[in-house]
Amino acid sequence: MAKLWGGRFQKSTDKKVDDFNSSIRFDKRMYKQDIKGSMAHAAMLGRCGIIPEEDSRAIIDELKNILKDIEDGKVEFLIDAEDIHMNIEKLLTDRIGDAGKRLHTGRSRNDQVALDIRMYLMDETEEIRKMLLHAMDVITELASEHTETIMPGYTHLQKAQPVTFAHHLMAYFEMLKRDFMRLDDCRGRTNVMPLGSGALAATTYPLDRYGVAKELGFDGVTMNSLDGVSDRDFVIELASCLSILMMHLSRFCEELILWSSHEFSFVEMDDAFSTGSSIMPQKKNPDVAELIRGKTGRVYGHLMGLLTTMKGLPLAYNKDMQEDKEPIFDSIDTVKLCLPVFCDMIATMTVKKDNMLKGAKGGFTNATDVADYLVKKGLPFREAHGVVGRMVYHAVTENKDLDDFTMEEFKSFSDIIEEDIYDAISMETCVNGRSVVGGPAKETVEAAIAEARKFAEQYKKE
Ligand code: ARG
């Protein structure tokens, strides 16, 4: 097949080089953006008198047909036509001849690919944000059922202080909310239109760049032609946003895997979200959570790969940059694969409230509250800390909890302790006394849930 750029060549490309060079295998997924971009470019060329109006119309009409044919599965893309840009241009010229050959006036594949990938990533970012909003809803609804489900909170994976499962869940809401905002922020920097940068040094044609940007829904245009074709920051930024998002899912999954173990037994994954073992009949494994945790690795890898691809590139476009697509596409696909299964997995799991409460009780999680009790009765905190430390040592040697102390035992450590100690250090008091903004108290978490619902509603209206 003759190459669109074949004029200065005496030989045809080696077959192996055709395969090696070609990106159609993976960039065909940008066909819609490529066609939309070409239609806006053609319309502008006609409007500005750069090509005849009737050619502009013919191009646009035929691009519409090509779009439909691709969507109906009627188009077979060619490896020899290298990439999505040249495949579509070739289809167009095969179908309408000279008018089609005028489409590429004042444009290079370098600014064309920069346009397509920006549009594609902006579309995908919106999809991912919608999925995230759903995940945030699932978390909020689950939390609303567990504002009284007391569980141990940990530091160093050692029992620390009691919290509620709702409070724990809402921590993940906060993470996903940041991801949601971060993606929007990243989209804002992707939202600049690069056509007009040409191959690297812009163009002599009087293009209406702002008109094209407006038609394609961009907020602005790129301000330097060299940067316009060689900037892939927005790809790296998205890879980074998606890495952080996967890190959050992975942390939650790690907890669910731990909590599904016999040793914790805080949750049980639904049968529909677990798998068995081919040898051990008793096994029920949290594979879904493990796979989400596992897939986080490839998303991080893509971020590192992209940074490395870009690190040594001189200005402006280099073919290395064709390597931006597979990693970012895979990061997007992975996140879109993980989010829905993550949502359904947590919505269907069984929460073992009794075990959570039992877990909260052992391990002196109310020791700080005993110290705070002494402080309220007038003891300086540092002194109270020492008294309670001795109590804990005694409890450990006696193999009991602080709540199990008799009044005499309490008195032997401090005679300011009264009967009201038992109520002051109950799990419920420990949790619900922490009603400062951001705390685990029932009413505080209920307020956080109300805020979360308001946040989601506001974005659903957009
Ligand atoms: N397929 C190429 C890419 O993804 C398109 C741009 C090619 N430009 C060029 N001058 N060879 O980067």
Image (cartoon, helix red, strand yellow):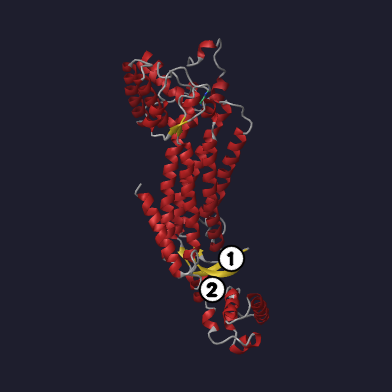
Res 369 visible:
yes
Give the farthest residue toward the bottom: 408
Q: Residue 358: give x, y in percent of width and height.
A: 53, 73
Rendered residue at 57%/40% (across/down) = 302
Q: Inspect this view and state whether residue 291 appears.
A: no
- The answer to whether the residue labelled 2 contacts the one labelled 1, judged by CB atoms less than 8 Å apart, is no
Kindly identify which residue carries mark 1: 154
Instruction: From this view, report whether residue 138 is shown above or below residue 181.
Output: below
Q: Inspect the image, locate mark 1, and give the three-letter code of the amino acid beneath it.
A: Tyr
Q: Residue at x 59, y 74 (%)?
A: 368
Q: Secondary structure at mark 1?
A: strand
Up the image or down, 278 lies above or below 58; here it is below
x, y percent for residue 395 = 64, 80
112 versus 7 height, above or below: below
Identity of the residue furthest to the top in this view: 10
Residue type at mark 2: give it. Lys
Q: Nearer the viewer, mark 2 or mark 1?
A: 1
Residue 456 position, x and y percent, is 39, 53
Query: To which residue does mark 2 refer?
Result: 358
As drawn, is 106 to the left or to the right of 378? left
Q: Earlier in the sequence, mark 2 or mark 1?
A: 1
Q: Is residue 343 left or right of residue 409?
A: left
